[in-house]
Image (cartoon, rainbow, N blue to C red):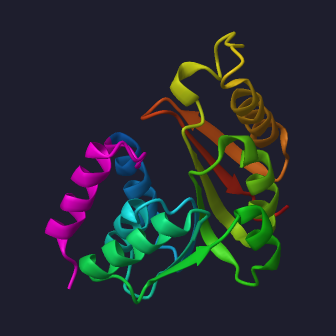
Amino acid sequence: MFNDEALEKIKQKALEDHIPIIMDDTLEKIIEILEKEKPKRILEIGTAVGYSASQFAKYTDNDCIIDTIEIDENRANEAQINIKSIGVADRINIMIGNAVDILPNLKEKYDILFIDAAKGKYPIFLEYGIKLLNPNGIILADNILYKGYVMSDYNAHKQRTAVRHLREYIKEITENEKLESEILDIGDGLAISRIKADK
């Protein structure tokens, strides 16, 4: 039984603790995609406290499995407790470690990949994502506009690397002939790329 109250508590605690979680308008768009596509297997990079993975479980069929990767062991443990309290622990597998090390060893094929982790690694996640997805699979990259920096002439030192890699990601998804992509100005920017079935 899905526990909506527990999910709402997790959301509020994450906001209070300034833990980045998926924004409401971004989530709405993703729910729309989940309900239309009816995925059987989802891969998430960046579990955080398990909020988005739990939302994905809520809006997919009971036979949809979600694999999610988290680099921070404490966060992963918190996510495990949260997922259990919501009642979806049987559908969500948390892998602890660096996604760059985990992705090359995955044997599953996925219908949807959700990227919400280290901005500087987005191009690497994309490269593996293309290999791990089924034809017609969808890659969703959150925070792609990164506070508006990515599409501006922003060049301050602090975020320069992240911004450069996000620009690189956008260039790749718009130029790669295997992908059909769009970038939505919702939340902090959401890039949606579909693997073309004939490529």
Quarter of the picture containing the N terminus is bottom left
Q: Residue at x 55, y 20 (%)?
A: 148
In the rendered image, residue 124, in percent from the top left (x then y), is placed at 80, 52
Q: Residue at x 43, y 67 (%)?
A: 53
Picture quarter containing residue 136?
Answer: bottom right
The residue most toward the front is: 74
Q: Please give left or right for residue 152 compared with residue 127 in the image.
A: left
Quarter of the picture containing the C terminus is bottom right
In the rendered image, residue 113, in percent from the top left (x then y), is placed at 61, 62
Give the magenta-colored segment's residue range.
1-24
Above or below, comparing residue 150 to residue 66 in the picture: above
Picture quarter containing residue 181?
Answer: top right
- Give whichever of 78, 164 is nearer the camera: 78
Q: Residue at x 65, y 65 (%)?
A: 137
In the rendered image, residue 111, in percent from the top left (x then y), is placed at 61, 71
The reply to whether the magenta stretch includes residue 164 is no
In the rendered image, residue 170, in percent from the top left (x then y), is placed at 73, 35
Above or below, comparing residue 107 to residue 50 in the picture: below
Above or below, comparing residue 94 to residue 137 in the picture: below
- Give whichever of 96, 147 is nearer the camera: 96
Picture quarter containing residue 58?
Answer: bottom left
The reply to whether the magenta stretch includes residue 11 is yes
Q: Residue at x 26, y 60 (%)?
A: 10
